[in-house]
Image (spheres, helix red, strand yellow):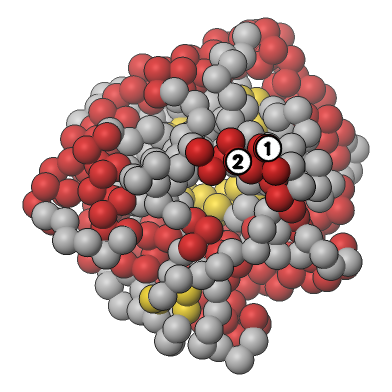
Amino acid sequence: MLHSSKRILTTHAGSLPRPRELCEMFARLSRREPVSEENLNASIETATREVIRKQLEAGIDIGNNGEQPRESFFTYVQHRMSGFGGRSERPAIADVAAYPSYLARLAAMLGPDTVDLLHAPKAIDEVRYVNREPLERECADYVRIVADYQPGFCESFMTAPSPGIIASAMLNEHYPSLEAYVAALVDALRVEYETIVGHGLILQIDAPDLAMERHTSYANRPLRDFQGFVELIVAGINRALETIPRERVRLHVRWGNYEGPHDRDVALADILPILLKTKCEAMLISMANPRHEHEYRCFAGKSFPSDMVLLAGVIDSTTNYVEHPEVVADRIERAARAVGDPQRIIAATDCGFETTVGLSTVAEEVVWAKLRAMRDGAAIASKRLFG
């Protein structure tokens, strides 16, 4: 995995805007309506090429396919794994439910082409990885397409969900316990993790569950119960990564990618010691939003291992404000001072910009402006930190 050896490198959290035509097809697919496979694949190809080009133009050093071949960052597994069907009833998000007028605003944003993550399919039978073809195609297509762009990215990554977010949002109606369900998901996800790394890509595990479930599934339970859940999922991730070198893995943790109150979020200090047990070399943490910007202090002193890289969130993925490059530079420099070594800092976005088809709070043109601001801020910070 690359480090910022001479300058601050830039990356992002994974998802990027999809074209309207692709969103419409994915929305139909998520509702199990017929979609032309030929048209879908052609649209994915075009969208992937465009999103790679725009990342490079915006100055992204470590890029990906923008998750163009997926309907969302985790429900796509229903097309690759067996056992899913029906409809989950996701627990209410505590901070959203506490503010009825905000909840009404949020509901008004959901359109007919939005993939509904609150009512995802649930586990109704044995969960196994049974359809590798979409996975192999996604990896191979990305490697083929990105090779056409020279100079291209310094490094490439691909995302995959944690077992915890699937277990939390695609509820269990088959297994005797959460532990048994997670164990089955670990075995299934091992296929995806190993395949991504086998194609020469860095694996990013998307694990919003490791923070967000505190104010969702565990909203009315003691903190220690939630920490026990985090321990269960981290142990499961590590089992799925048994054959993968830790330097090929980065973990993405967030509190939910929505512009909401977030006043029920768990403190990073309450979960960081458990997160650091994950078999990964890098950790992407949301640090640009108003609720968690102060938590760079958690990485000071010996709190963050000397052999790990911090992918510091320096761009808020939920607001249409375009950060000033000096603000970005300040955020990078704070993170570097806390960690104690600028070579162990990579600039990133807090989260993706379209983690779910049809649900994006940031306008497409603004997304690219924000990524350019990150590039410019990284350049300013590089001069100050590296000389």
Q: Give the percent coordinates (x, y) of residue 372.
A: 48, 15
Q: Residue at x 54, y 43 (%)?
A: 107
Instruction: Check the image and report above or below for 150 versus 246.
Output: above
Q: Nearer the viewer, residue 254 or 308?
A: 254
Q: Are marks 2 and 1 in contact (CB under 8 Å)?
A: yes
Neighbourhood count class around disc 2 (C-alpha, 10 Å): few under 14, some 14–19, many 20 upward: few
Q: Is residue 283 visible?
A: no
Residue sitting at x 37%, y 60%: 76
Residue type, mark 2 in image: Ala
Task: Read off the residue under disc 2.
Answer: 104
Identify which residue, 141 or 18, lies in the foreground.
18
Q: For residue 44, which quarter of the picture?
A: top left
Q: Is 100 situated left or right of 42 in this image?
A: right
- Residue 105: x percent and y percent? 58, 36
Element on which disc 2 rests = helix
Residue 263 seen anywhere in this rendered image of the structure: yes
Q: How many other residues sit within 10 Å of disc 1, few (<14), some (14-19) or many (≥20)? A: few
Could you say which is closer to the camera, residue 163 or residue 257? 257
Report whether 82 appears left or right of 243: left
Q: Position of residue 326 (x, y in %)?
A: 67, 8
Q: Residue at x 85, y 40 (%)?
A: 298
Q: CA distance from mark 2 to mark 1?
A: 5 Å
Residue plotted at (66% across, 37% down): 102
Q: Is residue 240 left or right of residue 329?
A: left
Amino acid type at image mark 1: Ser
Residue marked by disc 1? 101
The relative height of residue 131 versus residue 382 in the rendered view (above or below) is below
* Image vertical order of residue 75 relative to residue 172, above or below: above
Instruction: Give the percent coordinates (x, y) of residue 259.
Output: 63, 34
